[in-house]
Image (cartoon, rainbow, N blue to C red):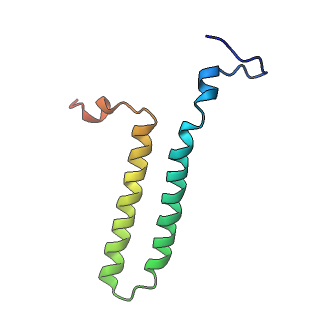
Amino acid sequence: MRRLSNRLHWDYKSASTGYENTNVLVILALAVLMAGFFIWLIKFIAHPTARTLLRVFVGVCLAAIVAFLFLASGFPTSLLLSSG
């Protein structure tokens, strides 16, 4: 493979596809901001059961985001599905 002639010797294919991860980072940042906003908004709800259920829902959504990041980063799903 051809290399660019800079000090860090970046691979030209990785340098040309660096913008592809931007969408994932934008989605992650928006999800974290929305989760923070909803956690802040939950404190204004008077009913304690509704507050608890909404906190659980926001937590599950954040767990789904973390799972997405693991799978999108190339974590092998065969390790998750193996039985031992």
Q: Which residue is drawn at 43% across and 38% down?
A: 72
In the image, residue 28 sits, relative to residue 81, either above or below, namely below
Q: In this view, does 54 lie to the left or right of 1?
A: left
Q: Which residue is drawn at 34% across and 66% down?
A: 57
Instruction: Residue 59: give x, y in percent of width and height.
Output: 38, 62
Q: Quadrant of residue 9?
A: top right
Going by the picture, which residue comes out furthest to the top?
1
Viewer-closest of 84 and 16 = 16
In the image, residue 22 sits, relative to residue 29, either above or below, namely above
Number of marks in the image?
0
Viewer-closest of 15 and 34 = 15
Instruction: Residue 15: give x, y in percent of width and height.
Output: 64, 27
Screen quadrant of the C terminus: top left
Screen quadrant of the N terminus: top right
Instruction: Residue 31: give x, y in percent of width and height.
Output: 48, 58
Q: Quadrant of residue 46?
A: bottom left
Q: Which residue is drawn at 32% across and 80% down?
A: 50
Viewer-closest of 27 and 77 = 27
Q: Which residue is drawn at 43% across and 32% down?
A: 74
In the image, residue 7 sits, relative to residue 2, either above or below, namely below
